Image (tube, rainbow, N blue to C red):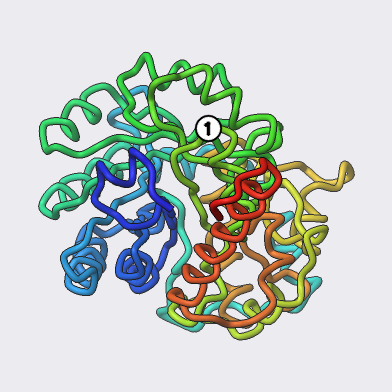
Amino acid sequence: METELSRQLGIEHAIFGFTPFPEVAAAITRAGGFGVLGAVRYTDPDDLERDLDLLHRHADGKPYGLDVVMPAKKVEGVTEADVEAMIPEGHRGFVRDLLARHGVPELAEGETSGWRITGWMEEVARGQLDVAFDYPVKLLANALGSPPADVIARAHDHGVLVAALAGSARHARHHAEAGIDVVVAQGYEAGGHTGEIGTMVLVPEVVEAVAPLPVLAAGGIGSGEQAAAGLALGAQGVWLGSLWLTTEEADLHSEALTAKLLAAGSGDTVRSRALTGKPARQLRTEWTDAWDDPAGPGALPMPLQGLLVAEAVSRIQTYEVGALLGTPVGQIVGRMTGRRSVRAVVDDLTRGFERAVTRMNRIAGRSDT
């Protein structure tokens, strides 16, 4: 499963695995893919340094990357307290009432929220980069599109490729003009923040829009056959996130959540603003239903919503409140039916890819396969 981009990065398979878990990222890299550690949950640079150190030690000298969340425009001087002050009291009351209806206990005394999306903030994201560039990361991806121009320049000065996610050809062209090296075409089916265009339509549009820049296909890809379809559409690799959530190396800290993922079908997800304020595909729960209900106050814009619900999400996860318990995940969740090692997942992807190529060669009348 080799492409020009995989050869450039020195990896065996053009499988790019995004994950919040350093052990999973390292295992993807060891299996011949390219592990990408998500940085959005790291508010303390020391924690990111600890996990990048773990990833580096366990990657066996093979390449890996980092995914950050940075707005394209540089914004300085805005603190978390400034943003917190913008949250209406009515929304805080809605959260309190929702948790009370489901009997969600308070966190124990002295326990703080372990779930807090603040990586979007200028000071936090740039602190992450200060740590990252001390490691031999080969790719810096940005989930919010093109990072600020000075960040792109800094990455290039370190010999690091820069990737940006795009949900439309228009967004992809903007990334190319900004100097991005790789575009991740993320379709509607994907977990987390997505646009409204399906992967099958989006990928060839983006490939054409940014040629000759390499494009990675993302969204609705959980098998080797689906990966082959992405490459057939012109992509130079696939970007996978949801598929790793139920691997043996993943640490969701919740057997109940893992069980929900393994039992879910492809129709059990929803694009909702409930988690971050931007449409993000996740498991449908009574939490998402409440925020999407027209009778409710509606989600706040990003980043207010993420700060508003941070403690609530931690409480739901800590006490494993089943009706409210969810996580970002794509429609591919229907294929996630059992715990497997990362190596087994990669092997399954490559075997499926080979089957698809053999099948297409046979259809095309090739007799040498």
Taking 178 as reference, is 9 left or right? left
User: For mark 1, what is the residue?
Assistant: 234
Residue 1: image location, x then y, percent: 43, 53
Task: Classify 10 Å Cα crowding around label 1: few (below 14), some (14-19), many (20 and above).
Answer: some
Report the front residue among 233 and 339.
233
Q: Looking at the rendering, in which quadrant would you find the C terminus?
A: bottom right
Task: Answer whether residue 128 is visible to the viewer in this image.
Answer: yes
Taking the view exactly as shown, the residue that stands out farthest to the front is 367
The image shows residue 277, relative to residue 58, as above or below, that is above
Residue 3: image location, x then y, percent: 38, 43
Taking the view exactly as shown, the residue that stands out farthest to the top is 177
> At x 66% / y 83%, what residue is drawn?
256
User: Which image quarter: residue 263?
Assistant: bottom right
Question: Disc count in the image?
Answer: 1
Element under label 1?
Answer: loop
Report the front residue among 132 and 27.
27
Report the front residue among 193 and 92.
193
Residue 271: image location, x then y, percent: 72, 46
Report the front residue among 103 and 202.
202
Amino acid at the residue labelled 1: Gly
User: Which image quarter: residue 45?
Assistant: bottom left
> At x 22% / y 72%, what residue is drawn?
54
> At x 60% / y 55%, what residue is drawn?
358
Taking 52 as reference, is 3 left or right? right
The image shows residue 158, relative to residue 256, as above or below, that is above
> At x 36% / y 36%, what residue is drawn?
163
